[in-house]
């Protein structure tokens, strides 16, 4: 593709030679002959520092925010802002051929995106999905490295979807992706808001920055679907030109309301009230499943999907890996894996399990390293206040010493009367919980969810909690 085509719509400040471009990247490790290299300044590395080296490696041109005194340089105002439309142009703007549904919020995005995909597929639509667990083009699965991919991967996925005749794409849109311009220039048919609680302040630094990043999604959508039980639900769309549709469990003035909610170990039931009334039977247990399914239903209804078709699709929905996932054990206790890794997420899952538990709720959890430290005592307090027993262990300690992370967690548990034990090794902690389980206990393994790895100070290791559970059970039988 010609360089001029790739730079279409971008304010270029200098003259340049129009060349054929083989590929586009912002990753200096990937540069080959004929590539366009976009210099982006990150937290620990500035691509501008290697621009000359990239030209020596064979790059056809480099995109920079300033005059580097180099041949074949393209100067723009902001390379991070420019990178998304550059990638879109390179892939021939595939998002323009898709109906995009974007979800943002602290919790619930993953399950809700899967539910929306299933509803749309139930009425015969071909749908792509982008999110934390996996990316999908129809039924074809691609690995997910980030909740919202970088612009090159994102636009490449859009291109695959269009080439596969997908009509819709439903995707999780993270606050970091919005702040970093990964979806710059992308317009959404529907933007949905789940909730907003403390998370990612290690990146955003302030609550205001976090909120404003989330709000960016609704500045670029036609229809906003928002949870008005959350205090930020109306604020996040305030003053924006998009059409607003609201959903709620507690507010009778919403467009879509869940009434007469009931819970069981098999799922949740409620009456969905809009201009019609119908019974929802969602086979995913937990209070938050009411909100997730209600959000999915609201998005579908806002898109004009038939009311009865929506109810039917939710009733036939499947769970999502790592989200309140019951692991088969053939024991008299239950083991559940859940991705809960924020204070609100942990509170939601434990509260939901308490509603269906016949025995104790035993929570095995830790906190991630190199992330917001203020969450750790809060999560410790929540786990202690809501559980019958806690096993404090490692999550992904990354470069931090696991014992220091645990000390931060224990600070929030010091005033609780709930018994707990500390076992630093996560496999050992899971094994301890299983060997000491009592009849009808629910053992919650919180924090890892769909992940099949653990990031330690010594490096990343394979760690799939499903395999760990199977190994423990196998050894217990010997």
Image (cartoon, helix red, strand yellow):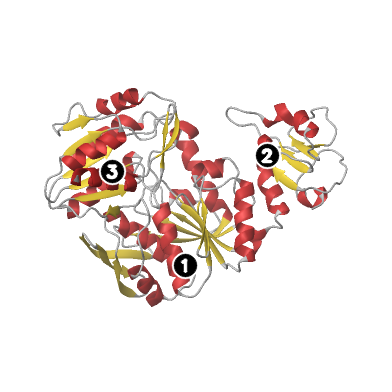
Dot 1 or dot 3, earlier in sequence: 1
Q: Mark 2: which secondary structure?
A: helix
Percent coordinates x, y for residue 310 in the rendering = 39, 72
Q: Mark 3: which secondary structure?
A: strand
Percent coordinates x, y for residue 177 in the rendering = 54, 44
Badge 1 is on which residue? 302
Task: Check contact, mark 1 vs mark 2: CB within 8 A.
Answer: no
**Closer to the camera in the image, 245 or 177:** 177
Percent coordinates x, y for residue 250 in the rendering = 29, 57
203 with respect to 166 (left or right): left
Q: Nearer the viewer, mark 1 or mark 3?
A: 3
Question: Which residue is painted at 60% across and 32% down in the image?
Answer: 42
452 with respect to 16 (left or right): left
Percent coordinates x, y for residue 408 in the rendering = 31, 25
Q: Nearer the viewer, mark 1 or mark 2?
A: 2
Question: Which residue is painted at 61% across and 66% down in the image?
Answer: 164
Dot 1 or dot 2, earlier in sequence: 2
Q: Mark 1: which secondary structure?
A: helix
Badge 3 is on which residue? 445
The quadrant the C terminus occupies is top left
Could you tell me how far apart the alpha carbons at marks 1 and 2 are, in whole angstroms? 42 Å
Could you tell me how far apart the alpha carbons at marks 1 and 3 are, in whole angstroms? 36 Å
Badge 2 is on which residue? 30
Task: Check contact, mark 3 vs mark 2: CB within 8 A.
Answer: no
Q: Quadrant of residue 94?
A: bottom right
Could you tell me how far apart the alpha carbons at marks 3 and 2 are, in whole angstroms? 38 Å
**Closer to the camera in the image, 465 or 180:** 465
Q: Residues within 10 Å of mark 2 (few under 14, many from 20)?
A: few
Question: Which residue is painted at 68% across and 49% down in the image?
Answer: 87
């Amino acid at each position: 593709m010609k360089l001029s085509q790739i730079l279409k719509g971008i304010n270029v400040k200098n003259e340049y030679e129009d060349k054929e471009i083989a590929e586009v990247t912002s990753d200096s490790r990937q540069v080959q002959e004929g590539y366009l290299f976009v210099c982006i300044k990150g937290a620990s590395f500035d691509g501008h520092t290697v621009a000359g080296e990239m030209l020596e490696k064979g790059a056809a041109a480099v995109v920079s925010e300033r005059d580097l005194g180099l041949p074949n340089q393209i100067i723009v105002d902001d390379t991070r802002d420019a990178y998304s439309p550059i990638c879109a142009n390179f892939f021939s703007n595939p998002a323009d051929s898709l109906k995009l549904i974007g979800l943002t919020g602290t919790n619930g995005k993953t399950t809700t995106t899967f539910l929306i995909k299933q509803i749309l597929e139930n009425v015969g639509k071909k749908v792509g999905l982008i999110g934390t667990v996996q990316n999908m083009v129809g039924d074809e699965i691609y690995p997910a490295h980030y909740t919202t991919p970088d612009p090159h991967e994102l636009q490449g996925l859009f291109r695959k979807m269009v080439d596969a005749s997908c009509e819709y794409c439903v995707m999780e849109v993270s606050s970091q992706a919005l702040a970093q311009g990964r979806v710059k220039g992308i317009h959404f048919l529907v933007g949905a808001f789940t909730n907003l609680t403390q998370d990612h302040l290690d990146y955003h630094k302030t609550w205001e920055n976090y909120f404003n990043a989330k709000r960016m999604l609704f500045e670029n959508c036609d229809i906003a679907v928002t949870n008005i039980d959350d205090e930020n639900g109306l604020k996040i769309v305030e003053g924006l030109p998009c059409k607003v549709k609201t959903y709620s469990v507690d507010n009778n003035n919403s467009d879509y309301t869940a009434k007469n909610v009931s819970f069981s170990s098999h799922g949740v039931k409620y009456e969905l009230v809009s201009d019609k009334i119908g019974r929802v039977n969602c086979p995913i247990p937990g209070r938050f499943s009411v909100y997730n399914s209600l959000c999915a239903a609201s998005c579908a209804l806002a898109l004009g999907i038939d009311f009865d078709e929506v109810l039917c699709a939710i009733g036939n929905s499947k769970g999502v890996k790592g989200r309140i996932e019951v692991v088969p054990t053939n024991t008299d206790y239950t083991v559940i894996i859940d991705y809960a890794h924020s204070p609100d997420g942990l509170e939601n899952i434990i509260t939901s399990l308490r509603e269906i538990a016949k025995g104790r709720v035993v929570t095995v959890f830790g906190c991630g390293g190199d992330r917001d430290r203020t969450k750790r005592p809060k999560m410790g307090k929540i786990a202690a206040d809501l559980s019958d027993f806690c096993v404090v262990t490692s999550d992904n300690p990354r470069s931090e010493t696991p014992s220091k992370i645990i000390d931060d967690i224990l600070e929030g548990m010091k005033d609780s009367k709930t018994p707990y034990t500390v076992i630093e090794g996560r496999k050992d902690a899971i094994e301890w919980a299983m060997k000491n389980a009592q009849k009808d206990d629910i053992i919650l393994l919180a924090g890892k969810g769909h992940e099949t790895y653990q990031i330690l100070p010594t490096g990343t290791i394979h760690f799939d909690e499903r395999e760990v559970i199977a190994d423990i059970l196998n050894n217990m039988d010997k």
